[in-house]
Image: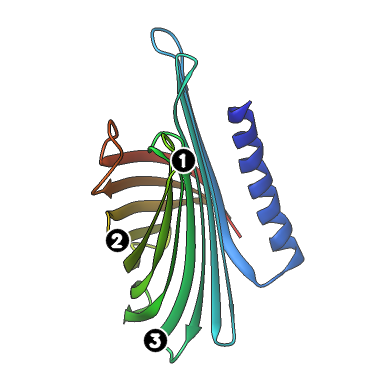
Amino acid sequence: MKKVSLVVAGGIAMMGAASLQAAEVSWSGEAELGIVATSGNTETQSINAKAKAENERDNWRHKLALEALNTESNNSTTAERYNFSGQSNYKLSERQFLFGLVTYENDRFSGYDSRTTEALGYGAQVIAEDSLKLDIEAGLGARQSKLSATGDSENEGVLHLAGNLAWDVSKTSHFTQELVSDIGEESTVSKSVTALKTQVNGSLAMKLSYTLKYTSEVPVGKEKTDTETAVTLVYGF
């Protein structure tokens, strides 16, 4: 049922993107869906659905992102994760801005029921060429974590650092590198997302991505490092 729900969610995201494009609203973004299934000696099924959108008007830029991942091996769920993030930037100048963000993660196998992070800070576009852009951010905030085993909550202050690189390798290929680190009083959570997207036809593209997440302190029995390699179909709007 969860796999079906994720496929439906991915389909709805793509249809919603098409509706937004048809309505000529001011949001732009992309929706992506990847499905891998094997049978025989090993039966596995993996579904990865993502959507992100961005709106820019006057001095404001708003960004939203959703992600869902589900993996099963021999009829047993081995990975299940849902992420949401929202960020608003207020432009101080052409290349400087203030930002506020919130992120929410629900990862069934991380040892936490949920983790929520909020931050406020300053950002700047240090490279602003036609084919190459680099944004950096720094801010202060807080993180709330709920432990799966005990139900206890952990609250801590965090230093938020981030960098986003976008490079148009060619007319049809686009490379991105995203780095985020939330340095807390109890633990540090760092995430790297490296991706290469190649245009297929019109609004459709294929994307290869590699995600690495490191958590310095984790519940007993959990790994500190998680990695994910994905190939997805992307619809841009």
* Label 2: element kind: strand
* Label 1: element kind: loop
Q: Which residue is mark 1?
A: 151
**Mark 1 Cα-neighbour bin, 10 Å: few <14, some 14–19, many ≥20:** few
Kindly report the distance in space between the C-alpha atoms of the residues bearing marks 3 and 2. Answer: 25 Å
* Label 3: element kind: strand
Q: Residue at x 40, y 65 (%)?
A: 142
Labels 1 and 3: the sequence-earlier one: 3
Q: Which amino acid, by three-letter code, is at mark 1?
A: Gly
Q: Relative to 85, say whether 67 is above or below.
A: above
Answer whether residue 68 is visible to the viewer in this image.
Answer: yes
Q: Are marks 1 and 3 in contact (CB under 8 Å)?
A: no
Question: Mark on residue 14?
Answer: none
Q: Are marks 2 and 1 in contact (CB under 8 Å)?
A: no
Q: Nearer the viewer, mark 2 or mark 1?
A: 1
Q: Nearer the viewer, mark 1 or mark 3?
A: 1
Kindly report the distance in space between the C-alpha atoms of the residues bearing marks 1 and 3. Answer: 41 Å
Q: Residue at x 27, y 61 (%)?
A: 185
Q: Which amino acid, by three-letter code, is at mark 2?
A: Gly
Q: Position of residue 210 (x, y in %)?
A: 33, 45
Labels 2 and 1: the sequence-earlier one: 1
Q: Which residue is mark 2?
A: 184
Q: Which residue is mark 3?
A: 96
Q: Quadrant of the N terminus?
A: top right
Labels 3 and 2: the sequence-earlier one: 3
Kindly report the distance in space between the C-alpha atoms of the residues bearing marks 2 and 1. Answer: 20 Å
Q: Position of residue 220 (x, y in %)?
A: 28, 34
